[in-house]
Image: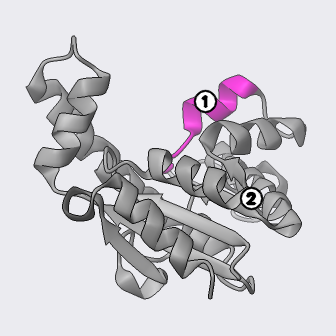
Amino acid sequence: MKNIITISRQFGAGGSTIGQAVAERLGYYYCDKDMIVRTAIESGNLSPEEIRYYDEKVPKEFGFGQSLFDFYNKPLDERLFNAQREAIRKVAEKGNCVIVGRNANIILKEYDKSLHVFISASERFRLKRMMGKMPDVPEAKVLERLHSVDKARKKYCKYYTHTEFGNAEFYDLSVKSSTLGIDNCVNIICNAAKF
């Protein structure tokens, strides 16, 4: 039985919804961005404001303007990534958890009993879902947001993990929520976790 499930997802594909349902069905702890950020804050190295500002942003200038040998003054973005990585590892050490986002699949790739899932969906499906969550926002703005979040996730993943977001090589299972539906994705993931 897999007792650590990581879920990476395209924006609007239902990854959080699916992750929560999987955790509930299996009786696992659910861990998303807010919980990871809270744990990173509790580490005492970063303020909540710093974390909110730099979360999932790639440094524009990595290391420029600072000494390459000044190890203790790393760019804040790198400190944030490291704090989140440690928070994810703390959660994983306890097992019986579903962790959504934050490149947890790469951070925990060496962990036994882990299942790494990627959830995608068609653009139309994602747009419709997000418009339902943001009814007062024009369709063009929602679509722009879909593209910008996906682009940011790809850049963040490549920069910090040197891997490709969404590439099947880095996941055990990939499901398409627009084709399978949310409930079937939950069923498939729960069944895959049994092995």
Which residue is depicted at the point 11% across and 46% down?
Answer: 124
- Left or right: 128 in relation to 19: left
Provide residue 27's location: percent of width, then percent of height: 73, 56
Residue wearing tag 2: 88
Which residue is depicted at the point 41% across and 68% down?
Answer: 118
Tell me the CA gap for discs 2 and 1.
Answer: 17 Å
* Numbered circle sitting on residue 125: none
**Above or below, comparing residue 35 to residue 141 in the picture:** below
- Taking depth in this image into account, of 179 and 10 the one nearest to the observer is 179
Answer whether residue 53 is magenta in the image: yes
Provide residue 95's location: percent of width, then percent of height: 81, 67
Q: Quadrant of residue 167?
A: bottom left
Q: Secondary structure at mark 1?
A: helix
Q: Give the residues in magenta.
A: 48-59
Answer whether residue 51 is visible to the viewer in this image.
yes
Which residue is depicted at the point 37% across and 75% down?
Answer: 174
